[in-house]
Amino acid sequence: MGRWEPNARGRLEQAALELFIERGFEQTTVTEIARRAGLTQRTFFRHFADKREVLFWGQGALQELFVSTVASAPDSAAPLDAVAAALEAAGAVLQERHESARQRQAIINANAELRERELIKLAALASAIAGALRQRGVSDPTASLTAEAGIAVFKIAFERWVNGTGQPDLPKVIRESLDELRAVTAGM
Amino acid sequence: MGRWEPNARGRLEQAALELFIERGFEQTTVTEIARRAGLTQRTFFRHFADKREVLFWGQGALQELFVSTVASAPDSAAPLDAVAAALEAAGAVLQERHESARQRQAIINANAELRERELIKLAALASAIAGALRQRGVSDPTASLTAEAGIAVFKIAFERWVNGTGQPDLPKVIRESLDELRAVTAGM
């Protein structure tokens, strides 16, 4: 067993983001990430399955937050209200990490395989939200459509926010994008 | 140069769909597809770059149809009206091919890599639609959001249609899904 390293996960993540930006994702090895963080490869693999997981480990927590927020919306909440609450809750968490979100996005944008992985992540989040809506008794196609529309809003809002300064904050950008979606559909 | 084979492309496509369903996508070779179609491997490669392209060659034509229909919508059309016209035009084309669409979807659903490819295709179609809206003078985030919402509607409507009997027809299912999206956003 290795010795306990203070904040090893955070240090590895920061080292990986720096190296992915400096050298590119493909060109960076786990050995280099561990060295930059002042840790061993073995410590790296205690925290992440591979270098790609450094960029995607947050998906599980995000999905859980979406699902639990949809589940705990008041019974009276309309499907899109429940989804909006979930998107804003996720937005509040991400708001605290604007700088690392910005770095992560630059890395993903520069690599076709990572862009594909990000699309798959968003599709999985939409499926999870649709499932949470069905649990609330929302039937299809409403459940699927609300979930897909919610993820579309999240994707657009996230892009605007991550490419900006971090202000206005992500929950506000999400609310604005939801208003925009309403305007777009009402104006048809 | 090989001799001209009547409807080689269609025969290869039908042979491939049959084999992918019987044996699985991974287990089927180009040699087997050509043999089943009564054609040579060489003829196969004159029509398709690889066996995956048999399932995805239609993406280019679909994208062109989306973009040209958005472009030719009346100046007075709201962004979602223009996108709705594009989705319905594509729906009318696909309606003619319900049986092969159903086979293709079963093959894609059974294979993780193909499901990912399908998501990437949908994301590319959304980008193309957003670009066509910008060409009409629609600014962002409206252009991106309308395109993503449109593709969400298309995805849900297509799933409903392809898993059914082909009736009601796809343009009608698309119109119903757009109405549903409007109801979902208005009810917020």
Image (cartoon, coloured by chain):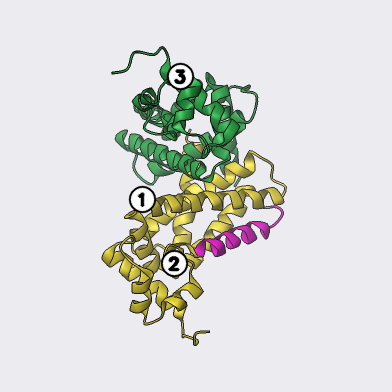
Chain colours: A yellow, B green
Label 1 chain ID = A
Q: What element does badge 3 sit on? A: helix
Residue B10's disc is 3
Residue type at mark 1? Ala
For residue B174, say whether it is visible. no
Magenta range is: A58-76
- What residue sits right under mark 2 in the picture? A54
Q: Nearer the viewer, residue B51 or B152?
A: B51
Q: Nearer the viewer, residue A140 or B116?
A: B116
Q: Main secondary structure of the magenta part?
A: helix
| Mark 3–mark 1 distance (CA, rounded to whole Å) | 31 Å
3 vs 2, front mark = 3
- Do residues under tags 3 and 1 come within 8 Å of each other at their CB atoms? no
- What residue sits right under mark 1 in the picture? A112
**Residue A83: in magenta span:** no
Residue type at mark 2? Val
